[in-house]
Amino acid sequence: MRATVARIFRQRTEESDLRGAAEAELRTAIVLDRLGPTWQVLHSVPVGPDHPVISHLVIGPTGVFSVLSRRHHAWRRQLNPERVTVRVLGDELLVDGLPTPYVPQARAQAWRAARNLSARLDSAVHVRPIVVIVGPEDIHFHAPADRVEVIGRRHLARRLLEFPVVNSPERVNAIHEIARSAVTWRS
């Protein structure tokens, strides 16, 4: 009952945060699942009991990517609606002026994925972190994030295809098989 009342009055609750995260992951998954047969995508990869899941692990010809997707409303809901602003100031990502921890979270998830995949494959696997913002499409870069891509959902597929080809189909399949194994993600 409380959650229903909070939704009617658009109050932020833990349930609304979880609902927003699930919506962001679903919308991002739809984009990733359209990449084509040369790409392998794992959703909600559990990396251990004390770490959050990796939203999406994308394995393809242009590399391995750890995708952290987060949703924010595109408009401020008030008497005179305004677009929500997203600004990237190096490792600080501001949504409507409020700092978010997305860039360090994405970097930590990519590092964890690279460490676990490399250990199981017995060769180095480089994982690029990507933060996908669902909702606001205008992202203003004042200083780029260090080794982390920050993009809107609509630009994700195109950006993944822009990187140079580094993996053969055999390597994509080998990394995918290892990433699917639960043994890979045990700490």
Image (tube, grey):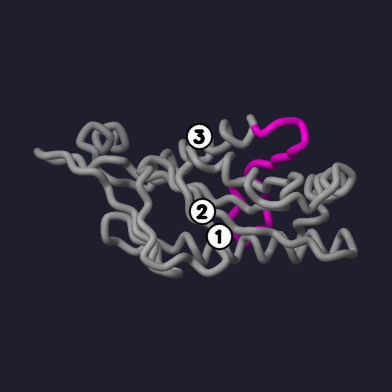
Q: Which mark, by number, is residue 128?
A: none
Query: Magenta stretch containing residue 175, yes or no?
Result: no
Left or right, 14 with respect to 62, comes to left
Circles 1 and 2 in contact, beta carbons < 8 Å: yes
Distance of label 3 from label 1 (alpha carbons): 18 Å
Residue 110 at what x, y percent from top left?
64, 61
- CB of mark 3 within 8 Å of CB of mark 1? no
Label 1: state its secondary structure.
Answer: helix
Camera-nearest residue between 187 and 135:
135
Task: Tell me which segment is drawn in magenta.
Answer: 35-55
Q: Which residue is mark 1?
A: 106
The span from disc 1 to disc 2 (Cα, nearest Å) is: 6 Å
Q: Earlier in the sequence, mark 1 or mark 2?
A: 1
Amino acid type of disc 3? Arg
Relative side of 120 to 94, left or right: right
Label 2 belongs to which residue?
131
Q: Is residue 161 shown above or below 109? A: above
The image shows residue 101 at horizontal and vertical percentages of: 44, 63
**The magenta stretch spans residue 51:** yes
For label 3, the residue is 27
User: Marks 3 and 2: in contact by CB < 8 Å?
Assistant: no
Count residues near mark 3 (Cα–Cα under 10 Å), then give few for <14, some for 14-19, many for 20+: some
The residue positioned 45% from the left and 69% from the top of the image is 91
